[in-house]
Image: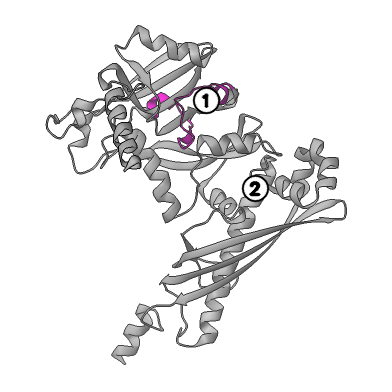
Amino acid sequence: MRMLRFMICALLLLVQTGCWNRVELNDIAIISATGVDWHNGKWTLSYQIVIPKAISSQTGESGTAAVNVFSTTGENFRYAISKASEETSRRLYFSHNQSIVIGQEAARKGLGPLLEAYLRNHDSRETVSVFLSKGSARRMLEQLIPLEQIPGAAIQRMIANQELGSSSFRQMTAHDVLMELLGSTQATSIPGLVIAGPGEGTDNAGMMGGTTTQTKVRLSELGLIQGDKLVGWLDDDQSRGTMWLTDHIDKTTVSFSCSDEGKGKETSSARILTASTRLKPEPRNGKWLIRADVEATGILMEYNCPGDLSKPAEVEKLERRIENEIKATMLDGWEAVRKQGVDVTGFGTLIYRSYPKQWKEISGSWRDVFPQTEVEATVKMKLNSTGMSGNNFKDAQKKAGS
């Protein structure tokens, strides 16, 4: 009974005191995405602000965008943010920020000022997704995306969906970028965004009324960051190779040819359902060797090659072709990274953990040692299903007609 009385008194006290730190929605401008550009020697910050009236189910207006984008400029981030009070009636609220888009020129200038400001802002979220843009970050924030009202949230969902679809890129949060740039190799990679299509962009709600849009926001290329600066790009295939090499493949599709040597058109494909990569560093002849062992399982999705898959020997040949394709993709990605000289593979961290004494000797010259590293890849592929037919459709059709 004494405990019950105590709980009732505590509840009454809580109801009377209320929320001491509540935020009134009428006083704030909720930001869904932030853009960072470098222009004329100053930082330009762009804000994608949600318009509650436009997304309300009761007052939604056709032809009205659910967000508004504006920019402020300053020699540092906090000053640029403070200048927002000169042109908006509400305080900027970053706690619901979904995405940060960094323009190419800003990324080449350096991410240090952004990360410094981010670390000291109590409104910042560690889970916000980070992207690069070859063009203006503001221009990317102005784009509307079909099926979604709030583009900032749509971009974050896009990268999460891509991880389950093709695994060409991995979602990089602000926390991921910080941890990797503060790590032993001080290097990271960030997915890029482009406006694809023949048009100039989709920045008007009236352009969304048709059955198609001329331009779309899409993920494309992987930006390589060394220290805190952008130093180069990998294309989509090279990026997928690094994802295989660094154990960031979730599910993806592998295309392959009918040739055991991998020559000819890749007319067949398999869906990878599980994949894992184990990396092991070894010192060899004054250099470093990384052994990459991949295990994958999947199902056959398309088969346009001769051969009867009801025979185990034919299935094994098919698995070898897929293994060779995965291996080639990995090594192509590695060669691209090696040429750039940026350790986004985390090899330096592996050596540090396995050989701390040797790492201490080479850590100061790792950027010169890294490109001399060799990679030996082995792949083990297991097809769990080849479908309902042992032959491709054309062969099965001929057999049925004979």
Q: Is residue 347 above or below residue 57?
A: below
Q: Amino acid at mark 2?
A: Thr
- Placement of the N terminus among the 4 image quadrants: top left
Residue 218 in the image: state x and y as whole percent: 39, 41
Q: Residue 302 at what x, y percent from top left? A: 40, 70
Res. 212 in view: yes
Q: Is residue 224 above or below residue 117?
A: below
Q: Give whichever of 4, 364 is nearer the camera.
A: 4
Of all residues, the one furthest to the right in this rendering is 285
Q: Magenta span covers which residues? A: 113-140
In the picture, measured across the screen, residue 166 lies left or right of residue 48, that is right
Q: Is residue 355 magenta?
A: no
Between 94 and 395, the one nearer to me in the picture: 94
Residue occupying image coordinates x 76% and y 46%: 352
Say which amino acid is labelled 1: Tyr
Task: Determine the residue located farthest toward the top in the rendered image.
Answer: 86
